[in-house]
Image (spheres, rainbow, N blue to C red):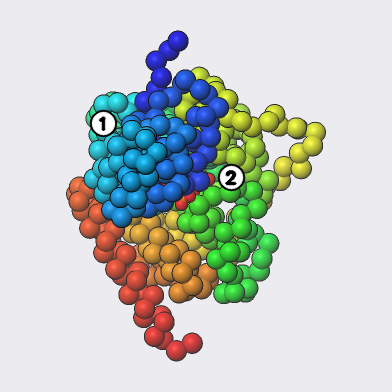
Amino acid sequence: MVQATGLTVLGATGSVGVSTLDVVARNPGRFEIVALTAHSDHEGLLAQCREHRPRYAVLVKDAAADQLEAALRREGLDTSVLRGEQALADVAAMPETDVIMAAIVGAAGLLPSLAAARAGKRILLANKEALVMSGAFFMQAVADSGGEIVPIDSEHNAIFQSLGGQRACRDRGVRRIILTASGGPLRERPAREFARVTPAEACNHPNWDMGAKISVDSATLMNKGLEVIEACWLFDVSPDQVEVVVHPQSLVHSMVEFEDGSVMAELGHADMRTPIAYGLGFPQRIESGLPPLDFCGLPPLTFEPVDTDKFPCLALGIRAARDGGRMPAVLNAANEVAVALFLDGAIGFDEIPGLIEATLANFEPGSDADIEAVLATDRRARELAKSAAQARKRRPA
Ligand code: NAD
Ligand code: MG
């Protein structure tokens, strides 16, 4: 029997976290859960502690950590509760952790994911925002520590698989990377109706069941903009080598085209358990819980160009990728603010791109010197995005 892999799941109670633990449960004896983390959902984390018996459970919020601690004591479970942001980074870097699933949403995932990178861990990277914000520092930390990244975002996982389980593209005859996009829930909705789109409609993705933030990103197509930036860092390619094509069935998860005209693609169900199982088992294949693909029962696979006039967030993402430096971090911060305001009902769906563009206009593309400077850029961009939203509210319609 091989030794169990020590696994820490950051963002265990979220959509990717829950799918990760589902795959773990299907592979008994293969993983030992070192730590599970969440922001404040103590009940969700308690249920996961009962089933997976982690050594540590981390909650960012103190009051939630107190509740979890009391409940674990009542039930006689010996999981230790840690609290606060620093504890996220601590469990990501501790020696018992061999592999981390980085599945916190947004910029909050940066420091814990970076701690794992510095500690030389194998990082199963779902938290694309960390890479978008600080790609240069993140990739350098992985290279310096001898760590490893296995992409979990389905497109990047498909590219990784199409490259034969490697990230390197250089000198391997790669002509271009083709990211597929479902087009999101508003693909067929006319742009003139975007002012009326509700958070529930924007989150109602036709193919994927995901957390609220990435669901809105999929509706604006900012998700694809972030993914272009993510692809540039992961595979060391320029934005001009990355193309986006709409593929509404979400069966082809992305493709790599080579100089000789060969195109390698990965196909499968639109279910994150496949890329998650790939990452957890890598380089072996393990059970994910998904049934075989019934090829004769599949809908026709179709491809169409993206309408960036209708979805300007994708164009903003590509522009930030080309500008480089701090612009992707600004883009990410402004987008997180805009999405949160939209989910709170404070701005319309149609106002999201304008708010991000207005924030980007305050910055020059030079590079930040270190991670502290990246975090300062992130904070400044958030403030500017919030004031831009306030200013719009005050302006008469
Ligand atoms: P989610 O909202 O469902 O879950 C987020 C998790 O992070 C939760 O466990 C939550 O407790 C935790 N969290 C939230 N804010 C936090 C904070 N400030 N500090 C610490 N923990 C915090 O999100 P998700 O859909 O699972 O997405 C997670 C990441 O994976 C995102 O970066 C997303 O872009 C990426 N991703 C998700 C999917 C998907 O299918 N859901 C697919 C590809 C990539
Ligand atoms: Mg994706």
Please tell me in which quadrant of the rendered image residue 289 appears: top right
Q: Is mark 1 within 8 Å of ligand 1?
A: no
In the image, residue 265 lies at what x, y percent? 60, 33
Where 359 sits versus 140, above or below?
below
Where 309 sits versus 65, above or below?
below
- How many marks do you count on the picture? 2
In the image, residue 46 lies at what x, y percent? 42, 43
> Which numbered tag is attached to residue 105?
none
Question: Which amino acid is tagged 1?
Answer: Met
> Which numbered tag is attached to residue 180?
2
Helix, strand or loop at label 2? It is strand
Q: Relative to residue 380, is residue 210 drawn left or right?
A: right
Foreground disc of the pair 2, 1: 1
Where 90 sits versus 393, above or below?
above
Location of mark 1 (residue):
94
User: Residue at position x 70%, y 29% from top?
Assistant: 292
Viewer-proximal residue among 64 and 154:
64
In the image, residue 390 lies at what x, y percent? 36, 78
